[in-house]
Amino acid sequence: MKIAEQLFGQNISVKNANLHYGEFQALKNISIEIPEKEITAFIGPSGCGKSTFLKCFNRMNDLVAGCKIEGEFRIGETDIYAKETDVNALRKNVGMVFQKPNPFPMSVYDNIAYGPRTFGVRKRAELDGIVESSLRAAAMWEELKDRLDKSALGLSGGQQQRLCIARALSVKPKIILMDEPTSALDPISTGKIEELCDELKKTTTIVIVTHNMQQAARISDRTGFFLLGKLVEYGDTDKIFTSPKDERTERYITGRFG
Amino acid sequence: MMTNTKVKEKIGKSAFTAAAVLCIIAVAAIFVFLIVKSLPAFKKIGFFDFLLGDNWSPDKGDTYAGESLAGSYGIFTMIVGTLAATVGALLLGGVFGYFTAVFLAYFCPRRLKRVFSSVINLLAGIPSVVYGFFGIVFLLSKLSVIAPNNGSGLLATSIILGIMILPTVVSLSRTSLEAVPRSYYEGAVALGATHTQAVFKTCVPAAKSGITASLVLGVGRALGETMAVVMVAGNSPTYPNSLFNSFRVMTANIVMEMGYAGEVQEGALVATGVVLLLFVLVVNLLFSLVSKKTVRAAVKPKNKTVVRKKTFHGVARLRDRFGNIAYKLKTSYIGRAFAIGAGVLSGGILVLVIGFIFAQGLPHLLKNPKILYGKFEFGSENITIFPSIVSTLMAVGLSLLIAIPIGVMTAIFLNEYARKENIFIRIVRSAIDILSGVPSIVYGLFGMIAFVGLLGGKSSILAGSLTISIMLLPTVVRSTEESLKSVADSLREGSLALGAGKMRTIFKVVLPSALPGILSAIILSIGRVISESAPFMYTMGSVITATPSSYLDSGATLAVALYRLAGEGWYMQEAYATAVVLIALVLGLNLFAEWIGGRLRKKLKGTEQ
Ligand SMILES: Nc1ncnc2c1ncn2[C@@H]1O[C@H](COP(=O)(O)OP(=O)(O)OP(=O)(O)O)[C@@H](O)[C@H]1O
Ligand SMILES: [Mg+2]
């Protein structure tokens, strides 16, 4: 079997997105264009819908019972909510890193090999190659090459999170979604992951949710500010942080609410 | 290629659903078979004559076609007997279990706690025939000194049943006692109550519903118990007029006569099973009513604020109470003495049961180890339990092969595919609840009517294994489901986010993490097959002399063999040796379970580098 390929572009385009959890409307009429190979940050107070919006891009919201999504979501030319779109292929192309590191309870090697194996890679040599390149891409190869067969659960929190990034990279995603990837980590681990993002954006589109204003300012090219399910302001990070157009954005980034 | 995955997903889901449907079918089949088989008897005998008649003297010649009945089929004495034995068990085992639970929760030194928990677990694991055997060789012989008869009767039955329901009562009571917020206790002590007062006046009342539920569960267990009772009750179909007269319970009625029953008699025995089943179902319903509101709330408080509110309320109420009581009783030694006494005594019982049987049986076993592996020679003095060992192993193997896949798949269905409640899921859950409540002798009846019937009327290891498999299902489903629940959702999300399908996620990520639960289900199941005897008597057969060579042969498991050996009274040494083997197996399984459980958990936590 070959690794499943389906043509997805690397830019995301959303028009008039509305999302309901049962009766509750979590996203209100959001439209956004996310360019390829840049880092886009979503900021906003807790509960404003950042994670919900992020999870629309790899259809993780499909798992939530009672979740209704309207609007147009395109990655490249592909309508990701179209009937003929294969969810698994979508998720292979749109990787995700979660807030809390979630390595599988298996060895480091098997964690990384999980994705490729899912898509039919069986040959040991090929897997070895993928494991090494993924770990290298996550700047972990030197650290981990001697403990590939040890349980991933024995790693530190920061290492686990970078392992999860390596795991996400193992299927060569074109886009990576990160939901507060550093909120459970110490500053040093956070720094490493930020460097990593900077490196990854050469080839990959990154969308990151963060509560850390400095982080957004440091690493992102574009920033979107969410409030109560609405995208209040979206634009170049420099602009957003130096001269926001909306008063609510300004109040939020200067720490006066949220 | 992608469609390939889709097809796999579809097949997987259908298979899991099918397993769940099987559980429903099992329950339906039990009811249908029992009712169909008993209805003619109810009709022929007359519903009220059957329930309220107190004369049981069956005639083998009675047929449904015959004009009238020569025999008489009233089970009222047995209904009374069953209730009396249950009340007796509750008085002894319930009260005793209650104090033991209080002891474990509040008076037991921390280091001893683990020991006592293991003791209680072991008590729960000892096969009921072993209790019955202990009853015969120890209890009856001691009681016969003061009894006008050989010691059998209501007292002996109540004592044995009391011991048997003890673990049930203790473990659930203890869970709910330990779930009482610490602040209750602290509130009481802060008001000047002593430790004992705080425990009995504050913590115990707070756990009242959990304790009640545990007693109800114990009642269910006592109602359905068969073999142990058969061995010490005497079994004459008369009322239990005194502590020492032979009487019969409903379960015993079935076991005693099923082997050689005439047509109407057989129907009447199945009808006895139906009445018994109704009793147990009512008790179980009662249990879910009692426990629904409070035990679950007590065991896992939904959110903290509620608990805190309750605490304030509790403390306020306390103040009023202790206004009076704290002055009156400075200390109360009685409660403490009871609790500690109960704890020590239940440990003592285990030591006594195991010690006595080992002391008698082990020397014989060591002197004559051939009993384990020697060939059985008919008519010779060389009784061996080799045939029973083979039968037991065969039954264990096949029933695991049936029950584990179906049970695990049902659990997967319930936990992975059915997160939103709907009618179907509720039916599956009630089916499993009902299965877990059906008394073992009723499974035996069902197996006899259904499987033995289907397999040509001859008892066989196949029929026995099928029967016990159904009985294992609820244990397997629950144990697996618990461990599936404990697998973090973030792992599922991690797998799905990589593009893996649901099947792959379940088999590669969820199930491996749930392995400890599945393993404990397997071990529990093995223990169950080894310990049970009532479901096997008439499905697998009770012939202990022939080594089975195929699954279509009949054969007695070790537990059934012990019943036969002890019942016939000729081969007491061999019976002791069999009991030793049974206890050793159960002990070994318990130890193994603890060991492997610890290891696996460590491995999954990643502490093992
Ligand atoms: N599965 C769900 N079912 C119902 N409501 C949900 C669900 N998930 C999220 N919500 C609600 O939707 C809103 C947006 O939630 P979301 O998790 O997207 O917020 P967030 O911006 O990521 O917040 P945080 O910064 O705390 O992570 C919240 O009000 C939340 O309560
Ligand atoms: Mg979030």
Image (cartoon, rainbow, N blue to C red):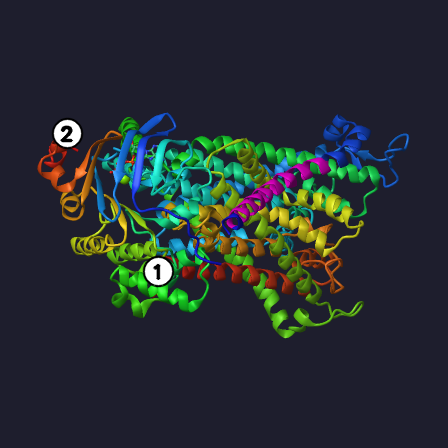
Residue at (57, 43) in percent of width and height = B14
Whether ligand 1 has any atom under 8 Å from the Cβ at mark 2 is answered as no
Q: Please tell me if label 1 and label 2 are on a single chain.
A: no
Expressed as whole percent of the image width and height from the top left, the position of residue B442 reads 67, 42
Q: Quick check: B164 above or below B352? A: above
- Camera-nearest residue between B76 and B306: B306
Residue that carries the numbered disc 2 in the rendered image: A248
- Camera-nearest residue between A121 and A50: A121
The boundaries of the magenta stretch are B5-34
Residue that carries the numbered disc 1 in the rendered image: B606
Q: Quick check: A62 above or below B164? A: above
- Closer to viewer: mark 1 or mark 2: 2
Label 2: few (<14), some (14–19) or many (≥20) C-alpha neighbours in 10 Å: some
- Camera-nearest residue between A96 and B184: A96
Q: Residue furthest right?
A: B67
Q: Is residue B32 magenta?
A: yes
Judged by its main secondary structure, the magenta piece is helix
Secondary structure found at label 2: helix
Q: Chain of mark 1?
A: B
Q: Is residue B37 magenta?
A: no
Q: Quadrant of ligand 1?
A: top left
Q: Quick check: B268 above or below B357? A: above
Expressed as whole percent of the image width and height from the top left, the position of residue B373 reads 67, 71
Q: Quick check: B607 above or below B152? A: below
Label 1: few (<14), some (14–19) or many (≥20) C-alpha neighbours in 10 Å: some
